[in-house]
Image (cartoon, grey):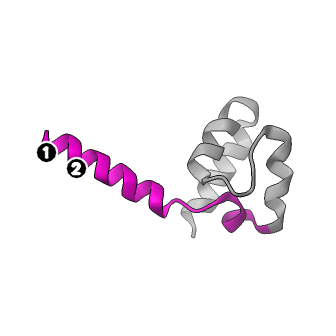
Amino acid sequence: MLFAATEDFLKWMYVGLMPLVVEVLGIHAHVLRRYGVLPDEEVGSAVAKLKAAAPHLAEFLREAASLQ
């Protein structure tokens, strides 16, 4: 059970440190609204939404977020 608790804690830490789309793309984050991504969304959930409709944008956003 300790391993599960540690894994949950690490997921919480990762989510806590995940930047918002607007922090990565600035004013350009509003362009992603057409794909159902809000500027104040976390990058992880935005990438998940974009994978189906625009995989090239999902990859770009993931890479851009990793540079910060």
Would residue 58 be found to the left or right of residue 33 on screen?
A: left
Q: Is residue 55 left or right of residue 7?
A: right
Count of residue discs: 2
- Please give the label number shown on residue 6: 2
Residues in magenta, as a range: 1-26
Q: Residue at x 30, y 52 (%)?
A: 9
Task: Please give the name of the residue rendered at 70% of the width and 38% of the height, measured from the top-left corner.
Answer: 50
Task: Find out whether residue 33 is within the magenta segment.
Answer: no
Residue name at image x 68 percent, y 51 percent: 60
Q: Most extreme residue toward the top, as rendered?
A: 52
Task: Indicate whether 30 appears above or below 37.
Answer: below
Front-lying residue, 23 or 53: 23
| Element carrying mark 2 | helix
Quarter of the image containing the C terminus? bottom right
User: Tags 2 and 1 in contact by the CB under 8 Å rule?
Assistant: yes
Q: Position of residue 51 (x, y in %)?
A: 66, 35
Residue 38 picture location, percent across and down: 75, 50
Occupied quadrant, residue 46: top right
At which x and y percent is residue 18?
Answer: 52, 59
* 16 or 23: nearer the viewer: 16
Q: Secondary structure at mark 1?
A: helix
Residue named by callout 1? 2
Q: Amino acid at mark 2?
A: Thr
Percent position of residue 41, x then y: 66, 52
Image quadrant for the N terminus? top left
Q: Characterize the magenta stretch by its predominant secondary structure.
A: helix
Which amino acid type corresponds to the residue marked 1 in the rendered image? Answer: Leu
